[in-house]
Amino acid sequence: MSDPRDLRFTFPLMRGDDVRAVQQALTIINTQPPCGTVDGIFGNATRLAVESFQRETPSLGVDGVVGRLTREALFNAALQRKDGTSPAAGAQVNPAVPPQRPSSVPLIRANASRPPLGRTEAIKCRDWLMQNFGNDIKQAVQGTAFDPLLLCAIAAKETGPEWLRWIGKYDKDKIIARCVFDASGDFPQTSRLAFPPNTAAFRTKYGDAITADFIAEANQTRAMRDMGPQQWVYKGYGIFQYDLQHIDVDPDFFLKKQWRSFASCLDRVMKELNAKSQAANGDLRETVRRYNGRGERAETYADHVLTMFDWMKTTP
């Protein structure tokens, strides 16, 4: 996924859920001057509140812009304040070390947006996965802290909106094989920091033949989505969307097309979840957030996965 946008006071005024999330964090930590109304509009009051927070955080420059460093420090400070562990004014916040979440703090934020799938659709994803791969999923999580339905929720978030409409139309093996998604870096007005930033960079490193093969894989999926062909290498492979940036350390998954195997996809997602869980000290929300990345988009990702996880646990 492309990185969250930088937020600033400009004309026309920037608007959106990402602005609202920043305003909510500024309100929680009670900046002076306050940011004003939490309305999702980045006005001058929000800029002044951001600058105030930056002045009180020695590691940040004061420019009124919510970039990556300011975003991480701000959300971390807001979480600490909600947890009752707010640092003293002027203390440096280390965004790389998240606080342990007390049991009283909900896994899903009160202001969370709705997942891309509704409850009925999420349950349909769960049922299809457990009917076809339930034994594999249960065996994979055995001896870990993870529930099988968490993996179903991750798959529903990552790829469910695409393959849900293929159920009943294609067999399970074809559905798994065609989970090749996300053209960020080539799609207009998107960017990508991880390798490959675009198809041209992939071609430079891996050559014309391999690039053509990966483009063909993407176009097979595009055809099933009723989309025309493009000369793009996609970045997400498998039902849990293992990222193409891992090709240098895990070439067989991509070059031997192991994403077509549910077992191979399951192996990768469990390795990533176990590593993220260890880094998060076992905190479930933080594990899911880290599985996706950093910033507000990753927080939203965790909200969506955990909402669908809750639906899947409580709905027969």
Image: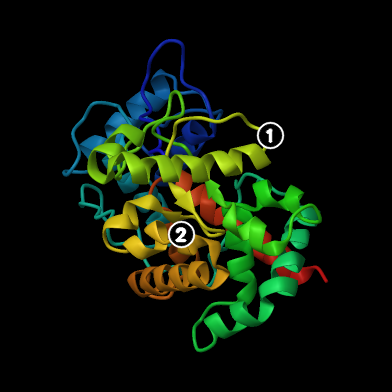
The location of residue 192, given as percent across then percent down, is 35, 37
Q: Amino acid at mark 2?
A: Lys
**Residue at (60% x, 29% y) in the render:** 228
Q: Which residue is mark 2?
A: 257
Q: Which residue is mark 1?
A: 226
Mark carried by residue 117:
none
Q: Is residue 274 above or below residue 194?
A: below
**Residue at (38% x, 68% y) in the render:** 276
Q: Quadrant of residue 272?
A: bottom left
Q: Residues within 10 Å of mark 1 (few under 14, many from 20)?
A: few
Q: Nearer the viewer, mark 1 or mark 2?
A: 2
Query: Where's the C terminus, which quadrant?
Result: bottom right
The location of residue 138, given as percent across then percent down, is 61, 82
Note whether residue 234 is visible. no
Q: Is residue 141 left or right of residue 168?
A: left
Front in this rendered view, residue 46 or 270: 270
Q: Is residue 303 above or below residue 142?
A: above
The location of residue 161, given as percent across then percent down, is 67, 47
Q: Residues within 10 Å of mark 2 (few under 14, many from 20)?
A: some
Q: Amino acid at mark 1?
A: Asp
Note whether residue 207 is visible. yes
Front in this rendered view, residue 244 or 108: 244
Front in this rendered view, residue 168 or 145: 168
**Residue at (54% x, 77% y) in the render:** 146
**Residue at (39% x, 33% y) in the render:** 185
Query: Which residue is most to the front?
Result: 209
Q: Quadrant of residue 26?
A: top left
**Please, what secondary structure does the residue beneath circle 1 have?**
loop
